[in-house]
Image (cartoon, helix red, strand yellow):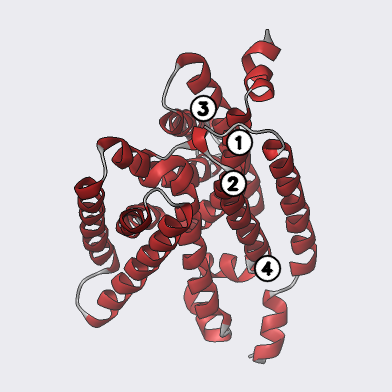
Amino acid sequence: MKSNGSMLRLLLLGAGPRLAGAALVVALLWAAFLWATATPGAL
Amino acid sequence: MIWDAVIQPFADFGFMRRALLGCVAISVGATPVGVFLMLRRMSLTGDAMAHAILPGAAVGYLVAGLSLGAMTIGGLIAGMAVALLSGFVTRVTALREDASLAAFYLISLALGVLIVSTRGSNVDLMHVLFGTVLALDNAALTLLCSIASLSVLTLALLFRPLVLECADPQFLRSVSSLSAVTHFTFLALVVMNLVGGFHALGTLMAVGIMILPAAAARFWAAGIGGMIAGAVAIAMLSSVSGLLLSYHYSLPSGPAIILVAGIFYAVSLVFGPVGGLVAQALPRRHFEV
């Protein structure tokens, strides 16, 4: 049985690249936010 | 022609751009959560939780009117309370989780409708039940984008534990202390996304954009990554198509978006290559499972 620390490392394997991809999606989302809210338009 | 039908509504009208952004934020944040809900056989739990946030939002409405902050905090508290209470009842009594969750959400729904009806008009009740995607202001959009950002980053960090919990929760529990953290973080993500979706699509429709694209994507991809990508794409296409249908034919936007997602689901059910009706009816190669 692996120790808790090494199991944690295994469970978080690949989290770095995934977080980088997620950060890109988040950046695109907020860019879209700036585009959509640049002009008034809410009812 | 295509410009007039597809681009012009978003280019000319700010409220259409805001509605589109709100729907895109929900698609990016809530739909991957829906994929994990489906894989954990908790799709109906999501539906029950969507109804459960109603009394909290209604109390927020009672205290502060149609205030974004008050209704959001009320919805979050009510959703988390019902999730924890139904889990508690399941552990200490003989009642199964589905029955206790059904009991709590029915009580919540009735209580929420009662609270809104005592002070508000039918218009307010319709706003709470079906949302106002065409009237999203800056504060609502900030909330939706924040929830989507938090969801995407959390799912990226906890992807492997979540996948393991879908496949074999007892194994994860036995080898790591991350099991409880993963479970409660996931529940919090479900409630947060339902509360965010509730502002745009209402309590009755919010779960639709979470589950229908996930169920449709199940017929197109065998892996979880492909399923998430497919579900987000279907949710975005449904949002754009639903908003355009609503604009051109004067239809209510929320139901139009969910109905288009329903059409995607029906098409996937028939033609999807992974377990769809046509794929199952076609003769398989020898030794193919």
Mark 1 and mark 4 lie on one chain; the one further toward the N terminus is 1
Residue type, numbered disc 3 = Gly
Question: Disc 4 designates what residue?
Answer: B157
Q: Do the residues at discs 3 and 2 belong to one chain? A: yes
Question: Disc 3 designates what residue?
Answer: B242
> Among all residues in the image, which is located at the extreme top?
B1
The span from disc 1 to disc 4 (Cα, nearest Å) is 29 Å
Mark 3 and mark 4 lie on one chain; the one further toward the N terminus is 4
Question: Disc 2 designates what residue?
Answer: B141
Q: Position of residue B237 (x, y in %)?
A: 60, 31
Mark 3 and mark 2 lie on one chain; the one further toward the N terminus is 2
| Marks 1 and 2 in Cβ contact (< 8 Å) | yes
| Marks 1 and 3 in Cβ contact (< 8 Å) | no
Q: Chain of mark 2?
A: B
Exactly how many numbered labels are in the figure? Answer: 4
Q: Position of residue A37 (x, y in %)?
A: 67, 39
